[in-house]
Amino acid sequence: MTVELRTAAVSADGLCRRYGTIRALDDIDVTLERGITGLLGPNGAGKTTLLSILATVSEPDAGRVSAFGLDPRIAAERVAIRRRLGYLPQELGYHRHFTVAGFLDYMAILKEITDRRRRAGEVARVLAAVGLEARARTRIRALSGGMRQRLGIAQALLGNPELLILDEPTAGLDPEQRLRFRELLSDLPGNPVIVLSTHQADDIAAICPYVVVLLQGRVRFTGTPASLAATAAGRVWVADQRDTRARLSWRGSDNRWRHVGEQPPAGAETVPPTVEDGYLMLSDPAGTW
Amino acid sequence: MMSQLPAAPGPAGGPAGHAEAELLASYAAGTAGTVAAWSVEAHLTACEPCRTALSERVDPERLARNRSVLLVRAALGDGGRTMRLLRRCGIPDHLLRLLAATPSLRKSWLLSVLGVLAVLAAEAAAVSPGWTPARVLAGLPRLQHPQILIPFLLVAPLLVLAGVAAAFLPRLDPAYQLTVAAPFSGFTLLLVRAVSALAAALALVVAAAFILPGPGWLPAALLLPSLAVCGLALAAASVMEARAAAIAAGTLWVLPVLLLAGRHLPLAIVHWRAQSACAAVLCICAFVLLMRRDRFELGWTR
């Protein structure tokens, strides 16, 4: 019998980061394998901070990161990580006077693709991947929000990165574009390490074989989407009337109330939980928006 | 052309003046030699059957890919006359493309600088008694009150400094996070942007100094102080926050200018003693910059 030894491509051990009195990350341990890992959590959970540290953009107060065996604290190894990195920050700034092709060309140079022909080939490839070929000459300021997001995804794909860090990549995309984005990630060559943060539990359920839930700067769950859903097993039920004992209730398309709570009433009609239900059960019981 | 002469052999001696199937296949695959490819291309322009035969052999995906690359290259263009000229001077294309993201090289910025300099020069000319273009052209002495040069001496190097600071201040780079996460050397990027912004602003300052009612050596005398102020800002940025460094360097220029102006010696700031001091500052700053260049490798800093 052979045993497959799987080593983490990217790992973070004991990461801590504070902003003044706010503890954004509190002793985070994460390992990322090749494939897609979804990072789920509410606003302020520390997702963006964690991703920016993994992307070598900011430094933790404590803890250690390793990517492909490289240590970003060492300047040469940090550059080596960046050569294998594609990063889409949550708040992506653009030079608004650039054209779409001009911006990607500029980013390709920053990714050390200095040969003119190779750059044009790369730009054409990523433009086709996000369906912006017809917009190559359009100025960024004239693009819609969804198109800008696709442009952000395109720049992250330049150079076929081995580590792709995407902070809320589906924000601003319409349903069809979100499906195309899933297809795009699934088709990426070379089986890269992909970590994406999102608020969309259905994105996680659809394309992520692995999910990490971050709450208040701490890892609350790691596992498969199915096991996340399973944490709410037996705690989701439907009824014709609203049940005030439930943690959260909403009326479904069949006009019946769907309840998620600690304890369904005796004789309640329980239903199979979703990833969203599992995520709700992990979150703060007293939480509001 | 081959197709107009059916009796003549086609490229590589094909039947009835048409290209051989093997040659078309190698051309479609991009493996035909240069001479053979030219021969095929010359023949194709006038031979419909060979064009049809070729289209059946071409991989449509490869064709679409090539078309996309051509469209991208057309969209990128060659950057205009200035870029062409700089490329001819041997500056690599990719470095020139990086300049497009430098705010102080944009037309609006340069026009603003030009506007400020024009106002200062015009103001100095207007208050200069006895100054007329005719007297300047005749080479007659034109400076009677050096005090009229104070606003220009105060502001001109600051304009150069502002251009350089705008080229490296993170808050003026909307794509700063992407720049940090990219492997391109932060120090190289800083130098490329700062030097180009410096050159553009200095050219405007020197040009404006020529039309001032000041001494003839003034345009040349402004070079070293401007370089020293910018060098100081860059060197200081290796030990403190970039904006604070620019403000500190600007203050270190403004204070002595005002001090000397108060003593009715405004031109002393560009006389040989001041020039020597500026040269010394520039050398020290260049050394500091070189020694601390790692500080400009971006990221993993708070």
Image (cartoon, rainbow, N blue to C red):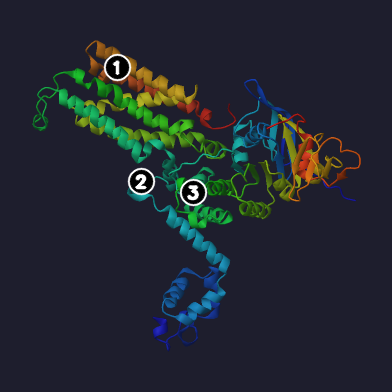
- Asked whether the viewer can see residue B85, the reply is yes
Residue type at numbered disc 3 = Leu
Q: Secondary structure at mark 1?
A: helix
Pinpoint residue A273: horizontal percent, then vertical percent: 81, 45
- Asked whether the viewer can see residue A224, the reply is no
B111 to B1, vertically: above or below:
above
* Residue at horizontal 50 percent and vertical 26 percent from the top: B292
Q: Secondary structure at mark 3?
A: loop
Q: Secondary structure at mark 2?
A: helix
Looking at the image, is mark 2 or mark 1 nearer the viewer? 1
Q: What crowding class fits label 1: few (fewer than 14 Cα within 10 Å), some (14-19), or many (20 or more)?
A: many
Give the number of the disc on residue B86: 2
Pinpoint residue B90: horizontal percent, then vertical percent: 38, 46
In 3D space, how far apart are the residues under numbered discs 1 and 3 (Cα atoms)? 48 Å
B262 to A175, vertically: above or below:
above
Residue highlighted by disc 1: B257
Residue highlighted by disc 3: A143
Of B116 and A276, the residue lying toward us:
A276
